Image (cartoon, rainbow, N blue to C red):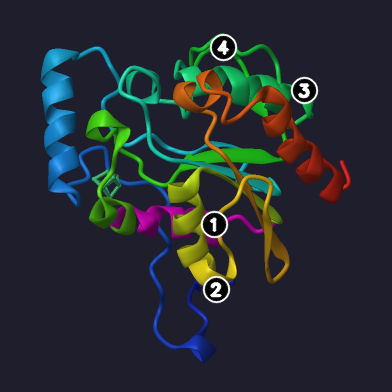
Amino acid sequence: MTTISTSENDPGRGPPVAPLRTEPDRNCPLCPRLAGFRAEARAREPEWFNSPVPSFGDPDGRLLIVGLAPGLQGANRTGRPFTADFAGDLLYATLIEYGFARGVYRARPDDGLTLVDCRISNAVRCVPPQNKPLPAEINTCRTFLSATIATMPNLRAIVALGRVAHESALKTLGLRSAAAPFAHGAIHQAGALKLYDSYHCSRYNTNTRVLTPEMFRSVFAKVKADLGR
Ligand code: SF4
């Protein structure tokens, strides 16, 4: 597992190390194509969030769920991962069912829903055109995913929703793709941490029955059992 120092002014460790940045600036310029897409959306829909979507949930949680990227009219509009995205309906219902969320999901960030022992983030924080980030954008935004993972002290389980999240998490954890191929239901060990794979709970995957609610629930049932909850 990748270990990234987060500390401090310890004279025995050399010069001070800047704290890891888990959240990008509102105007993060690192992916020019996505920054341009974001600017267009701000001009068109000034009431929308239209910024890198921050992680949601408990930094001290043991579970991190990693999605792909905000949907244009979902998380990009509301500012909370998966909120008002089609995929959020199944994700939040499942999290509530397995005790990783509390409250009622109403597809809006002020619905009072809280995550329990759990956090949600995305491999890419800005909405990409056609929901398709480029490889360079995934690589660039990994700095924030890596920092998020490195600053969760109790993290034991990561659920990767889809192949892009899986690959990005693998690179962060220092695992090779050949040794840990993506497959729905697969579990990969990285030190004390387990990476669980699931097909993404997207509209396309659920409508085509590539992913059924039962298949999705089985992943979280396994995580819950492994965490002893
Ligand atoms: S996708 Fe990530 S790295 Fe790229 S501009 Fe957005 S926040 Fe910055």
143 within the magenta span:
yes
Q: Residue at x 56, y 61 (%)?
A: 181
Q: Amino acid at mark 3?
A: Glu
* 3D distance between C-alphas at marks 1 and 3: 25 Å
Mark-to-mark CA distance, 3 and 2: 33 Å
Give the residue pinned by disc 3: 97
Cα separation, mark 1 vs mark 4, equals: 26 Å
Determine which of the numbered discs, if any, sits on residue 229 in the image: none
Residue under numbered circle 1: 149
Residue kind at label 2, given as amino acid type: Thr
Pick whichever, 19 or 195, lies toward us: 195
Say above or below: 135 vs 58.
below
User: Which callout, 1 or 3, points to the residue nearer the camera?
Assistant: 3
Mark 1 residue's CB less than 8 Å from ligand 1: no
**SS type, badge 3:** helix
Discs 4, 3 touching: Cβ within 8 Å: no
Could you say which is closer to the camera, residue 180 or residue 96?
180
Could one spot residue 132 in this view of the protein? yes
| Residue 175 visible at all | no
Q: Earlier in the sequence, mark 1 or mark 3?
A: 3
Between marks 3 and 2 in the image, the one whose residue lies nearer the viewer: 3
Could you tell me how far apart the alpha carbons at marks 4 and 3 are, in whole angstroms? 17 Å
Q: Earlier in the sequence, mark 2 or mark 4?
A: 2
Query: Which residue is the site of mark 4?
Result: 111
Q: Which residue is mark 2?
A: 3
- Hey, which residue is sitting farthest top in the picture? 106
Q: Mark 4 packing: few (<14 Cα in 10 Å), some, or many (20+)?
A: few
- The alpha-carbon separation of the residues under discs 2 and 1 comes to 10 Å
